[in-house]
Amino acid sequence: MPSCESIQARLSAHLDQELTQQEHQRIDVHLRECPTCRALYDDLARQRACIKKLPFPQPSDQEWRILMTKMGIQGPRALGWLLWIGGAVVLAGYALFEFATDPGIDAVQRVTVLAVLLGMVLVFLTVFGERLAGLKHDKYKDIEK
Ligand SMILES: [Zn+2]
């Protein structure tokens, strides 16, 4: 008698008629003798029947349009942000490296440029922080209503 594990591994293929005649019969014989595998097989068969009855979940035309619009706008926008931030970070890093290693630039210039860069980063971070705080605030407002 083949092991239950090897039978259970083939139940799905059995239901899909994917097995050879010999394997098919071997499983049929086992199912008649083994209530455990039989119960599993019945469950599987029921599930298959249910899935076949379900219509394939298709978004409606309206839902498709909304989805496509969202992806069409938000995809490129997200990519734009990524490129912009990525580029800015690389540029800032490159500029910092140049300034830190260039012996031709005097200390005053170096400090000034670093101050400007630091200022930009701080402004960016605070704007970003306000944005996040604003989002949170909006959420709480909705809850209070
Ligand atoms: Zn079994």
Image (cartoon, rainbow, N blue to C red):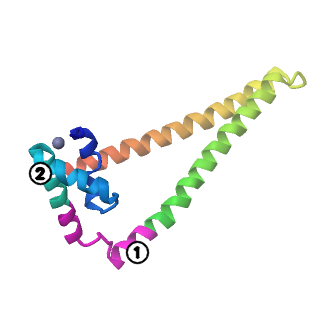
Tell me residue 87's x, y (percent): 67, 44
Quadrant in the picture for the N terminus: top left
- The kind of secondary structure the magenta stretch mainly shows is helix
Tell me residue 104's x, y (percent): 90, 24
Ligand 1 falls in which quarter? top left
Quadrant in the picture for the C terminus: bottom left
Q: Which of 91 and 18 is in front in this view?
A: 18
Q: Nearer the viewer, residue 8 or 128?
A: 8
Assign a secondary structure to mark 2: helix
Q: What residue type is labelled 1?
A: Arg
Q: Residue 65 carries which label?
A: 1
Residue lying furthest left: 35
Q: Which of 122 and 97 is in front in this view?
A: 97
- Residue at (63% x, 31% y) in the render: 118
Q: State the CA–CA distance, disc 2 to disc 1.
A: 52 Å
Q: Does the magenta stretch include residue 11?
A: no
- Residue at (25% x, 45% y) in the render: 7
User: Is residue 118 among what the camera can see?
Assistant: yes
| Range of magenta residues | 48-68
- Residue at (25% x, 39% y) in the render: 5
The nearer-to-camera label among 2 and 1 is: 2
Q: Residue 32 carries which label?
A: 2
Report if the beta carbon of the residue with label 2 is closer than 8 angstroms to ligand 1: no
> Considering only order in the chain, which callout, 1 or 2, is on the residue closer to the N terminus?
2
Q: What residue type is labelled 2?
A: Arg
Q: Does the magenta stretch include residue 63?
A: yes
Q: From this view, report whether residue 98 is shown above or below residue 79.
A: above
